[in-house]
Image (spheres, coloured by chain):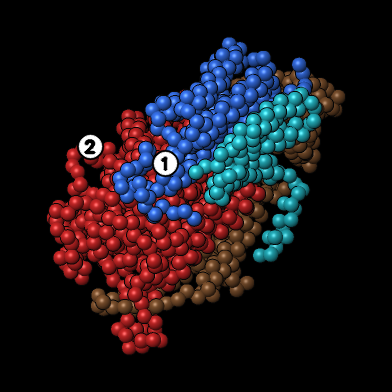
Chain colours: A blue, B red, C cyan, D brown
Amino acid sequence: MHRGWLVSEMAAHGAHPPGFAHQFETVEQQREAGTLGMWIFLATEILFFGGMFTSYIVYRSLHLQSFIAGSHELKVVFGATNTAVLICSSLTMALAIRSAQTGRSKGSTIFWLILTMILGAAFIAIKLRYEWYADYVEGIVPGVNWVAGGGHTPGVKMFMCFYFFMTGLHALHMVVGLGILTVLVIMTARNRFSSEYYSPLEISGLYWHFVDIVWIFLFPLLYLIGGRYHGS
Amino acid sequence: MSTATADIQERPGAESVNYLNANYGIKSWFLTFDHKRIGLLYLASINLMFLVGGIAAVMMRFHLIEPQGALFEPETYNKMFSTHGIIMVFFFLVPSIPATLGNFLIPLMIGARDVAFPKLNLLSWYVFITGASLALIGVLTGGVDTGWTFYPPYSSLYSHTAVTVVAFGVFIAGFSSILTGLNFIVTIHKMRAPGMTWFRLPLFIWAMYATSLIFVLGTPVIAITLFLLALERILHVGIFDPAVGGDPLLFQHLFWFYSHPAVYIMILPGMGVVSELITAFSRKKIFGYSFVAFSSLSIAVISFVVWGHHMFVTGQSVYAGLVFSVLSFLVAIPSAVKVFNWTATLYRGSISYEAPMLYALGFIGLFTIGGLTGLFLASLATDVHLNGTYFIVAHFHYVMVGGAVMAYLGGIHFWWPKISGRLYPDLWARIAAAIIFIGFNLTFFPQFVLGYLGMPRRYAVYPAEFQVLNVMSSAGASILGIGYVIPLVYLIWSMKYGPVASANPWKAKGLEWTVPSPPPTENFAEIPIVTEDAYNYPTIEAHQYPDAPGVARV
Amino acid sequence: MGHVVPISTYISVFLALMVGTALTTYVAYIDLGAFNTVAALLIAVCKMLLVVLFFMHVKYATGLTRIIIVGAFFWLGIMITFTCGDELTRHWDMVPHGWQALTPHIVRLF
Amino acid sequence: MMMGLIHAGIGSLVATIGLQPPAASTISSDVDHLYYVLSGITIFFTVLIFSCIFVFMIKYRRRSDDEVPVATHTPLAVELTWTIIPSLICAVLFVWAAAVYVRNSRPPASSTEIFVIGKQWMWHLQHMEGPREINELHVPVGVPIKVTMTSQDVIHDFYIPAFRVKKDVLPGRYSSIWFQATQTGTYHLFCAQYCGTNHSEMIGWIYVMSQTDYANWLASGEKTESLAQQGERLFSQYGCNNCHVPEGNGRAPSLVGIYGKPEKLQNGETRVVDESLIQQAIITPNSVHLPSYQPIMPTYQGQIDSDQMLQLIAYVKSLGSEERNGK
């Protein structure tokens, strides 16, 4: 039970370590607070996406056949590729944190961070170019370009709505994540982190992994669970 | 009155540095990370919103003096009650106590220098202001006429008002709630002073913790729901449109998943404040500390599984209705436990009746009525008759205005010496409390009868037979309105002319009373070490000192 | 000071996740009836656990972190269960048999 | 018996001083009895809490600023008592209220049916025998009446305070309530779910008439076909009878006796054929088609308005209930 009241030597002499905030008594207290804060934020994120998942489950049960038909409009190849890309980016993120944690050179941390960013950007690029854009051309984007007919029932339209809302919201989180990573790269370059203090890296990592987990569920829910075996 | 003059001399020199005079200028306020100043920023902004919502309410009551409507076209009246509801719920009641008193007091009460994330705290105020401004812009440019519940398909397809803008404002303000809740939870977990164990925490902190849980777990759902609604309005994709397979009831489920717990966001902090006031003015330890503390948590948890009682007549399945009904009864029990414990705290106390105590006692009485009338609505058969009528309006105003606003005012009065460093005129404060109590009951009690008689809510015109009760209610509203203006006047007056307050004018317990009034920016010169329970007021054992003054009258 | 996870652990977790992705895609092309859904979700949950426990260091974290995660999913469960509890039982109202037949007995209690 | 008398006593007392709406259906008294008991509980606890507060306020007022109060302790028994007693009260109230509710959620089989369409901002009411009314409904006393309701636009709510019945009227779905009036008279009909600008003018009157008066009223109106007959005409007009042949050997299932039966759909779901399902079958046939037939039925979305929909539903229902055909 380490508590913050033991005013550390450093704080007492006014020599705060970089990144230490005045309202805390110790660096450890600050680190724990940051991590706890991020976990609570992720809990709200679970409920945020949860509202979407609940709606999806309800409508799927109401329009089962249409949702299966709708899921057959999606391209599993790109979905699966993107899943792999995101998992790779989670690995590189974990390695970036590990690199800071174990006091490797800042070049090593920056390398892993930039690799993570490249993978994240690749995910968005694939999504945009080979999925959303293709869907737009095909005319299966509700509210934007929806070509009626082709046996598309209202339920299929509903499915596509959810597909775009859910993947869109996820992609938005990816973009925010890329922004955070950019800041982290700059901070690392300016020697803001050490093996003593790398809390921003750690909590950003939690966020990045969370976004990965959302996709881990979106992929089967949107692309797979209807089964891909019927038809061609 | 005894405290008003006695303690002035205790105060250190007038030039002592505190959070108010530490630095000056607009920048020192709008860029402050000090939780106390942020609390005051919130105080100013939510009172402004209260004013807007209150004006709308007074206009509505004037309109309803005549059955055919005295003032407006129905369309304007609809915008009026929607504005009132949206502003009051999302921009006043939800942030009322947490964002003002919570921000100001949590670090002081637990012995911390600030909340865990001061920058996030300021950010959440800016987010709130952005949301509130958007909502106000929406209200002023075109208004909104959906009611605060935004039910589709009316809100999504039929309303021609500024629904999207206002919903977006509420959406943004939601993130302010989330950030505040997150900050409070981390602060309460990680920033407590040495010795401040969980069971030594003031009950206000327990209540704020429970409230923060709801903020964090409920608010994201309303955010995503309003987001879907806005998309539906902009793109017409049919999410809540039954014509293309959408289900409007799904919106209601998601909406009430947040909005029912939100009722407890409003009342739980009030309960926390009342626990502080009752103990301070009876100079006694709270009766059943752990029961009051755990009832806050259980209310927070149960509040999430009762939302379906808003949907008993909306076409929800009978079976779901049964489950929600039994769970709704369940939430009555921790609330009852709290009321009994507060009342029992008074027993053998040393009770004085300064204004905050009057508000606290008013809270207990009105909340009792508000809570018990909730049983009518948890009961399936009576709810069918009363749902959507003025009975509902009366019930939730008893809880939210009689409960939450009373507690808010009581809390502001109680901690005003700490916040401002000044004392307000107690006589005026007592008069205002009495006027508010009378005005409130005159406004809302007739509405219970109106509801049972069958008058539906949100009616711009109504059958003539309901006029007498409506006029009574409107008369009460004007009294209530005056009652609310009085504290505004004397509190502002007191900031300049009020007698200077000592560190502890009420002789209350709690860490916030151990620091000067107003507190210094860093709160505590040295972080205190806590060695005793909350509300450890001196008492004597009855059998030991049968002749002691406190015992003589028993 | 956070726990330093060996690189070998990260690599194994990574490989397991990749295998999971391949497996879930493969299974979708086999006709298992309702079990397609079950299998897909089961694999997703396993993958999530791997990420949470190792990449997010929950295996080495305090009880508080675990309570938050379990709590968040519990609340999500509440939302899904109760919402579906209504949506999926709405059509039952018209069903003449089922436990509605019992209600006269309950009514007779009064 | 005793309780009944007390309730009746309270009822007449409350009604005389104008605090009670007219009670004019078989459900009213059930709801009112519960209401009185709830009011009694509310008054009891409110008085209890208020008097405790007042007594303590006076008895234990602070006499001097340095007064020290007597310690009180928190006996577990006290806490448990005031936890358990409210729990028991709540349990009883729940079961009672739920029993009344469940009993009233199912219309008697012998109910006469009336259709209601809500639209901004009026009520269309349609008798099975054919007559239509707007914002007015004539019903006979002493006969159970089932009201089947749908909305053309937003959510409305059909509320008759005197009968203590209320239910939301939803677009795209059919909801129903039932009542049996016990007293002739004129009663309010309100829309109780906010539905837009003139929500407060979406009101009407319910005329409860003696059964002979009602028969006369029906006879006096202009002669119209019954709802089912109008539906039958539409059925052939749209060519539905080409496929849905009664003998069951057509390209589509026979509709004779289908109403109220559970059917297994192509998507694996089993649904009872009700109003909502019939409407769904007409608007989006593929979503509910039966596995043994080809999904060849075209959609009639946009061609059939809600009045016609009710006529078709009434026709299908008339095929289903043999006893009504026999009459």
Q: Is D113 on the left or on the right of B298, as rendered?
A: right
Residue at screen point 60% across, 14% down: A130
Q: Which amino acid type is shown beneath numbered disc 2?
A: Lys
The foreground one among C70 and B487 is C70
Q: Is A95 on the left or on the right of B34, as rendered?
A: right
Is residue D191 in view?
A: no
Dot 1 or dot 2: first in sequence order is 2
Is residue B354 in view?
A: yes
Disc 2 on helix, strand or loop?
helix
The foreground one among D319 and D326 is D319
Residue at screen point 67% across, 20% down: A76
- Dot label at residue D241: none
Q: Which amino acid type is shown beneath numbered disc 1?
A: Leu
Residues packed near mark 1 inside 10 Å, few (<14), some (14 to 19) or many (20 plus): many
Q: What chain does mark 2 sit on?
A: B
Residue at screen point 53% across, 53% down: B301
- Dot label at residue B27: 2
Label 1 and label 2: CA atoms lie apart by 23 Å
Disc 1 on helix, strand or loop?
helix
Question: Whole-percent x and y of residue B33?
Answer: 30, 42
Q: Is B147 on the left or on the right of B376, as rendered?
A: left
**Above or below, comparing residue D37 to residue A22 in the picture:** below
The foreground one among A80 and C37 is A80
Residues packed near mark 2 inside 10 Å, few (<14), some (14 to 19) or many (20 plus): few
Q: Is B119 on the left or on the right of B213, as rendered?
A: left
Specify the quadrant of the image occupied by residue B24: top left
Question: Whole-percent x and y of residue A150?
Answer: 67, 14
Question: Whole-percent x and y of residue B289?
Answer: 45, 66
- Dot label at residue B179: 1
Residue at screen point 64% across, 39% down: C49
Of the 4 image quadrants, the one containing the N terminus of chain D is bottom right
